[in-house]
Amino acid sequence: MTSRSFRAPLAVALALGSAGAATIGDARSAPAAAPAAIGPAIGTRIAIDAALIDSSGRKTTLAAVAHGKPIMVVLFRSAKWCPYCQGQLKSLGTVAGAAKAKGVGFIAVSYDSPVDLAAFAAKQGLSFPLYSDSGSKMIDALKLRDPRYAADSFAYGVPYPTTLLLDAAGTVKGKTVETDYKIRPTNADLIAMLPRV
């Protein structure tokens, strides 16, 4: 999929409508900041010692995953329940391949448990690793948490859909942030970002 908006099949949309729409609808309606103002600014060096957990449950850090090379990090809401994230993740193999060809690492991160991430990755046969940000600590450190969800919502702790392109030192060289959870950048947009590192 390369369209700006990933649409769930009707069955998924109907299931969400009956099972989870009330909780999703509980998102606070506070206006979001302009996307460019959310999260780390381009040119900012971020802490790459952020703790992550791989899909087999092993603890690691962003620095260890990057192996001293540039890396593209996709932060998504949930592989377990977000159909827009699921659609995006299924389509990102092309971007991961283009990144690898340029010597750039590629990972995707959410607040999902390692078990949920492993199940999704196995079912979809993803060509890139998924990492858990337990407790949304990295999401919070990057100031990417979507504040519209109350602590009693299952969506509490999700990030704005974001892509960060980091050089080997952890400096942000490229960034996309979407305040509308239904919208994602195209794969072409992400691939076009790669020459910045």
Image (spheres, helix red, strand yellow):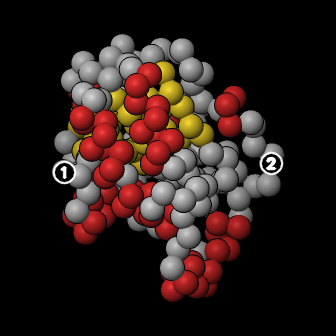
Name the quarter where the N terminus is drawn: bottom left
Which residue is drawn at the image coordinates 32% and 17% (left, top)?
A: 168
Residue at numbered disc 1 = 56
Name the quarter where the C terminus is drawn: top left
Q: What kind of residue is marked 2? A: Ala
Residue at numbered disc 2 = 30
Left or right placement of residue 30 versus residue 75 in this view: right
Give the secondary structure at mark 2.
loop
Give the answer, above or below, for where 182 lies relative to 7: above
Give the answer, above or below, for where 185 lies relative to 50: below
Which residue is drawn at the image coordinates 64% and 69% (left, top)?
A: 23
Q: CA distance from mark 1 to mark 2?
A: 37 Å
41, 153: nearer the viewer: 41
Instruction: State the image coordinates of residue 12 (x, y, percent, origin top left).
Output: 51, 80
Visible residue check, residue 119: no
| Other residues around mark 2 within 10 Å, as few (<14) / some (14–19) / many (≥20) | few
Instruction: State the image coordinates of residue 41 (x, y, percent, origin top left).
Output: 60, 21
Q: What kind of residue is marked 1? A: Ser
